[in-house]
Image: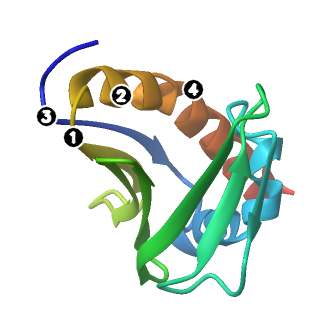
Amino acid sequence: MSNHIHASASCSHETSAPAATVWAFFEAVHLWKDWNSGVYSCVLDGPFIEGVWMTMVLPDQQVIKSQLVEVNAPIGFTDETVFGDVTVRVRHEIIALPNGNHSIAYSIDVAGEGAEDICAQVSSDFPEVLRALVARAESTVSV
């Protein structure tokens, strides 16, 4: 494992879906499994607001407990997961573009031992996840 103690990465994808449509997909964490192959299940311990915890089960049945540390409806949210001395923050943003479309951007910041490896592992599916989210959001709008 790498000895680096800080790493970050980001990925974005443009969509014609309205921000409100994308935001609805973000808030419906129990449905993330429908468009994110890296999620087996996910539940919130309350409303989609800052301070609330969520429990995500990965396809390999690993359980991840994260907290919503920032929620700015309808433009973005950040969740934070702590594993011992390692902190992983993932920011999910909806950015208005001049052409009327939106960019959905995921960015990750990892602090702690092995940050570079953890960052690479967690962010490896960002392109696939964003493509699936965009496809789902755009098909919802066109229905």
Q: Is residue 114 left or right of residue 14?
A: left
Q: Is residue 90 left or right of residue 113?
A: right
User: Disc 1 designates what residue?
Assistant: 112
Quadrant location, the N terminus: top left
Q: Earlier in the sequence, mark 4 or mark 3?
A: 3
Cα distance in 3D space between marks 1 and 2: 9 Å
Residue 128: give its label: 4
Q: Earlier in the sequence, mark 1 or mark 2?
A: 1
Residue type, label 1: Gly
- 4 w.r.t. 82: above or below: above
Residue at (54, 61) in percent of width and height: 66
Question: Pointers 3 and 1 in contact (CB under 8 A)?
Answer: yes
Residue type, label 3: Ile
Cα distance in 3D space between marks 4 and 2: 18 Å
Mark 2 neighbour class, 10 Å CA radius: few under 14, some 14 to 19, many 20 or more: many
Residue at (65, 66) in percent of width and height: 54
Q: Nearer the viewer, residue 79 or 141?
A: 79
Q: Earlier in the sequence, mark 4 or mark 1?
A: 1
Question: Pointers 1 and 2 in contact (CB under 8 A)?
Answer: yes
SS at mark 4? helix
SS at mark 1? loop
Q: Mark 4 or 2, which is nearer the eye?
A: 2
Cα distance in 3D space between marks 3 and 1: 4 Å
Residue at (51, 69) in percent of width and height: 67
Image coordinates of residue 28 in percent, x first then y, are: 75, 68
Residue at (34, 65) in percent of width and height: 96
Mark 1 neighbour class, 10 Å CA radius: few under 14, some 14 to 19, many 20 or more: some
Q: Earlier in the sequence, mark 4 or mark 2?
A: 2
Residue 118: give its label: 2
Mark 4 neighbour class, 10 Å CA radius: few under 14, some 14 to 19, many 20 or more: some
Residue 5: give its label: 3
Q: Earlier in the sequence, mark 3 or mark 1?
A: 3
